[in-house]
Amino acid sequence: MTIHRLLATTLACALTAALATAWSEAPPTQPARPTATTVRTTEPARPAAATTVLTHDGPVRGAAHDGYRTFEGIPYAAPPVGRLRWAPPHRATPWSGVRDATRPASACPQPAGEVPGGSTDEDCLHLNVTTPDGAGPVRPRPVIVWLHGGGFTTGAGSSYDAHRMAVRGDVVVVTVNYRLGALGFLAHSGLPGSGTFGLADQQAALRWVRAEIGAFGGDTHNVTLAGESAGGYSVCAQLASPAAAGLFDRAIIESGPCTGRPDRPFAPSSVPLPTARTAGADLAAKAGCGSARDVLACLRRVDVSRLLAAQDADQQPAHTTPLLPVDPAVAIAAGHFHHVPVLIGDNHDEGNGWAAGIIQAGNPVTPDTWPDVVAAFFPSSGRSSGQAKAIVREYPVHRTDGGPVFGAVIGDADFACPTARTDGLLAAHVPVWRYEFADEHAPPLTPGTPPFPLGAPHASELPYLFDLGGRPRDLTAAQHRLADTMIDYWTRFARTADPNGPSSPHWPRQTVLSLAPDHVVPTRTVQTRHHCAFWNALG
């Protein structure tokens, strides 16, 4: 495998491995996932007022916990199967009786990883609601809608146990499944919705929230759209999508900079529709439908497992489409986006996980190999180009520091500096608060011993906000305090559009807030530390 192919493949593995580990370590008594169509009409064991909620499609019965309630596997759209495979989401079919919402539904089709054994169940357009217990406050609670990451190929809303955020922040949290991989982002000429079916699903979920969340104690007029990695970039896309107008009131973007570039295989981004159509034609050929008289009819008959085997490891939404008329980076640079307050940030060592994975796969980074690695990371440059030589000069590799240097290049080029650029573009029009998660001793997300200390890599902030896979990570007392502080910031932002409050250090809008157990302080050195002047000049 070439280094460049390994770079792209590793993208889909980092967060997947983290959450797969969390699922595999879950208590053995955790119930198995039911099919998405499970509907039971038995009377609820607990009082109806506590766990049964009436939606427009029918009543759902959730589960009561210590201080909160959960409602899992609620359909927000019809199963995208048969003629609805590669169609815009349709309204879910109403049901009679009380629907069992005590367990998560199937994840959307994806290879094995985060979801043990993977998934081939297309009946997956479901969401999960976590709401604090009790009769509720005088006013409805703010709502946070969470879009999971996973490179647009893996992930599930049910991987994110949001009860700590819901209870401490007194908010309602909704986690969402959306179509992934080729089933979510196939592009083909003559196919309405080409390249954006997964984004359309997210909008359908937001419309469901506007219509239904009041019954769960949420404020239909105070919805924050949030996500990490591909989920964060999805928030960028929704900011730029005219069809998302009025569907959310604030935005949180974690490690998904809106100005990421598709020619680099880490930070999520979108591609032009012609590029996406080329990938769609390749998929059709691999699936045995390339020469069919009706390619789409043929593809709709192909088994899911065969589609998963044929799709590329790297997936992106398409722009220059009706849902996403222009690249979000272009839209945001022009000020053509939904003007809502934004909380945005990334992690101090975003690239270290990928660098470690590539080294462990048998690709050492040494002074001798470093120019070739750079040329692979920037494939249009070539080893002898001025760009590659400039990067090698700016980031010299010595005998023992190849891994951290490689990680710094990935993190600076694809996360820290694009996040800084996105911050500046957004701040010209809306209030923006920017953070950098910097806990160098964050609990590891993957098993085993890495070839070098990872610091605060991609996705390492997630256990501070969620119990991944329903299982809390081991945190020190100081890390628990940091987790509480972060939840306070995130949920106050959702409540008032300002993360500041009397119980937390002040977060100025003009600086980056560094988040670590021993310090939560504003800093002005982020751009210098991440060589952003160099990357801005390099282009």
Image (cartoon, grey):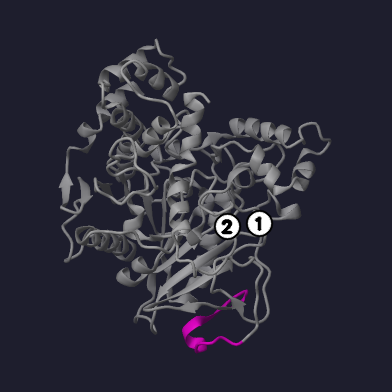
Q: Which residue is mark 1?
A: 121
Residue density around tag 1, few if under 14, some if 14–19, many if 20 or more, within 10 Å? some
Picture residue at 62% right of the left edge, 62% below the top: 77
Most foreground residue, 353 or 168: 353
Percent from the top left, x then y, of residue 419? Answer: 33, 40
Question: Gap between marks 2 and 1, in whole Å?
Answer: 7 Å
In the rendered image, is residue 251 in sight?
A: yes
Q: Secondary structure at mark 1?
A: loop
Most foreground residue, 236 or 372: 372
Instruction: Using residue 63 as the reference point, say whether residue 383 is left or right of it.
Output: left
**Of pointers 2 and 1, the one earlier in the residue sequence:** 2
In the picture as drawn, the residue positioned furthest to the right comes out as: 293
Q: Is residue 409 above or below residue 83?
A: above
Quadrant where the C terminus is found in the figure: top left
Percent from the top left, x then y, of residue 156? Answer: 52, 56
Most foreground residue, 112 or 437: 112
Q: Amino acid at mark 2?
A: Ala
Q: Which residue is mark 2?
A: 107
Q: Amino acid at mark 1?
A: Asp
Tell how many labels.
2
**Quadrant of residue 346 within the rendered picture:** top left
Residue contact between numbered discs 2 and 1, judged by CB atoms under 8 Å = yes
Picture residue at 68% right of the left edge, 79% below the top: 96
Q: Secondary structure at mark 2?
A: loop
In the rendered image, is residue 262 in sight?
A: no
Instruction: Find the magenta span and give its range.
Output: 43-59
Most foreground residue, 259 or 116: 116
In the picture as drawn, the residue positioned furthest to the bottom comes out as: 47
